[in-house]
Image (spheres, rainbow, N blue to C red):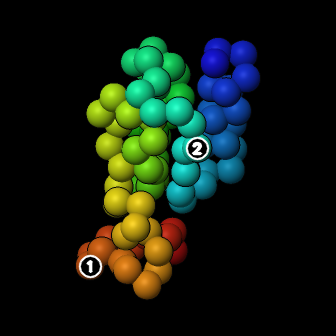
Amino acid sequence: MRKVAAPQVAELLTKYKPAILWWDTSVDMSPEDIRLLTEHFKDDPGLIANNRLGNGVPETPRPRAVRPSNRIPGRDWRRA
């Protein structure tokens, strides 16, 4: 986690600034692993992520609401 995954996530979030980060990991990761993976979330409050990490990491919005055909009123799922 410390040598590969967390540095890669940090690079994605700081260098490329994606609008959506979709986790494809096992659920219920340890709190320490989650902290390492999400420590840069605070730098982009508009980031959309699913809740696949578990342990209370919120998703915004729900995965089915991210599709353009099912948007949440007042919340743009994509970056302008």
User: Left or right: 62 with respect to 35?
Assistant: left
Residue type, mark 2 in image: Asp
Residue reaching furthest to the left: 73
Badge 2 marks a residue whose secondary structure is loop
Q: Which of 35 and 54 is in front in this view?
A: 54
Q: Which residue appears at 43% of the width and 84% of the height?
A: 69
Q: Earlier in the sequence, mark 2 or mark 1?
A: 2
Q: Which residue appears at 56% of the width and 36% of the height?
A: 25
Q: Which quarter of the picture shows residue 12?
A: top right
Query: In the image, which disc is placed on residue 56?
Result: none
Q: Which residue appears at 36% of the width and 78% of the height?
A: 71
Q: Which residue appears at 40% of the width and 18% of the height?
A: 31
Look at the image and tell me whether residue 14 can be seen. no
Measure the C-alpha gap from mark 2 to mark 1.
27 Å
Q: Mark 1 points at which residue?
A: 73
Q: Horizontal and vertical percent for residue 37?
A: 53, 29
Graded by Cα atoms within 10 Å as few (under 14), some (14 to 19) or many (20 or more), the crowding at tag 2 reads: few
User: Left or right: 9 with respect to 54?
Assistant: right
In the displayed structure, would residue 62 be above or below residue 10? below
Badge 1 marks a residue whose secondary structure is loop
Q: Horizontal and vertical percent for residue 19?
A: 54, 59
In the displayed structure, would residue 15 be above or below residue 72? above
